[in-house]
Amino acid sequence: MVYETKMKKIFLTPASRKRAQRIPIGLGLAITLAFLHNAGADEVYLGTANNYAVLAGSTITSTGPTVINGGLGLSPGSAVTGSPIVNGAYDVDNAPAVQAQNDLTTAFNTAAGLAPNQNLTGQDLGGLTLTPGVYFFASTAQLTGLLTLNDLGNPDAVFVFQIGSTLTTASDSSVVTINDGGSTTPGISTFWEVGSSATLGTATAFQGNILAETTITADTGATVLDGRLLAINGAVNLDDNTITAPPAEVVGSPVPDTGNALLLLGSALAALVAFGRRFPSGNFSAPLR
């Protein structure tokens, strides 16, 4: 028995054809937006080091009325000099401090191993406006004046600064975040991986987490908002400072990337609504039984 199949020509109206032709454009736009939104760095998970606003390896010294809004941790050293006000855990040469140092070392190595997006070696950070990503300095990094971090509307934006040797800020320098997507802790996902020591100049207003191989010094009146001073092997030296850490993340869970997921979903839905739901892109032939 032989079946004969005929083809029926189906024609789209001009309006339908235009809508159909826009579908790939719309989907492409959604993917592009999501890609640009995701372009940046991976999260650097601090583990139990999240529990501390100040963590040191050798000693912690405090001069003047320093306030630490978050925990204080020290290991393997045991000497805390001065009387900082600590609004959080106080762990000196004990198991939690040892674990925090182990987690800090892991986070330091993770940050150092990320592929950089841009080489800023030799440039002063002052006056720059940067978007999420990984920024590399072969040796020293200097901040004189204002550094602006543009989150591009993403509350989960990640910045990583890989600094080969030292980080130094001039007096009255500052780091500010804009377009943070409504985040209440914009500095939580900013990481400064420093190969040796970091010094925050007098009255510096800083943001983010400093992960230093050796010593961190905060000169008189320097403040850290939504961040931490975390030294692996050296001391943390404080002088009339205020360090305010963001709330500690749940151990075992990195910061949820809700911003990226919502943007991807929203972009795809917007593309479908804006550009129609018809898949044909022109005339086609269909079997006629």
Image: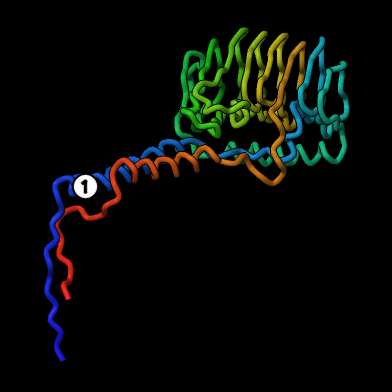
Quadrant of the image for the N terminus?
bottom left
**Residue picked out by circle 1:** 21
> Which residue occupies the foreground of this view, 223 or 18?
18
Quadrant of the image for the C terminus?
bottom left
> Which residue occupies the foreground of this view, 288 or 41?
288
In this view, 133 is above or below 30:
above
**Could one spot residue 234 in this view of the protein?**
no
Crowd band around label 1 with a 10 angstrom C-alpha radius: few (<14), some (14–19), many (20+): some
Q: Position of residue 251 (x, y in %)?
A: 72, 43
Q: Residue furthest bottom?
A: 1
Q: Is residue 90 left or right of residue 208?
A: right
Residue in view at x 82 percent, y 18 percent: 61
**Amino acid under label 1?**
Gln
Q: Position of residue 187 (x, y in %)?
A: 61, 26
**Could one spot residue 191 in this view of the protein?**
yes
Q: Position of residue 87 (x, y in %)?
A: 81, 24
Q: Position of residue 245 (x, y in %)?
A: 71, 26
Looking at the rendered structure, the secondary structure element under dot 1 is helix
Residue in view at x 72 percent, y 9 percent: 220
Residue in view at x 22 percent, y 55 percent: 280
Residue in view at x 34 percent, y 43 percent: 273
> Which residue occupies the foreground of this view, 268 or 32?
268
Q: Is residue 112 left or right of residue 133?
A: right
Q: Residue 117 appears in which quarter of the rendering?
A: top left
Q: Is residue 210 left or right of residue 135?
A: right
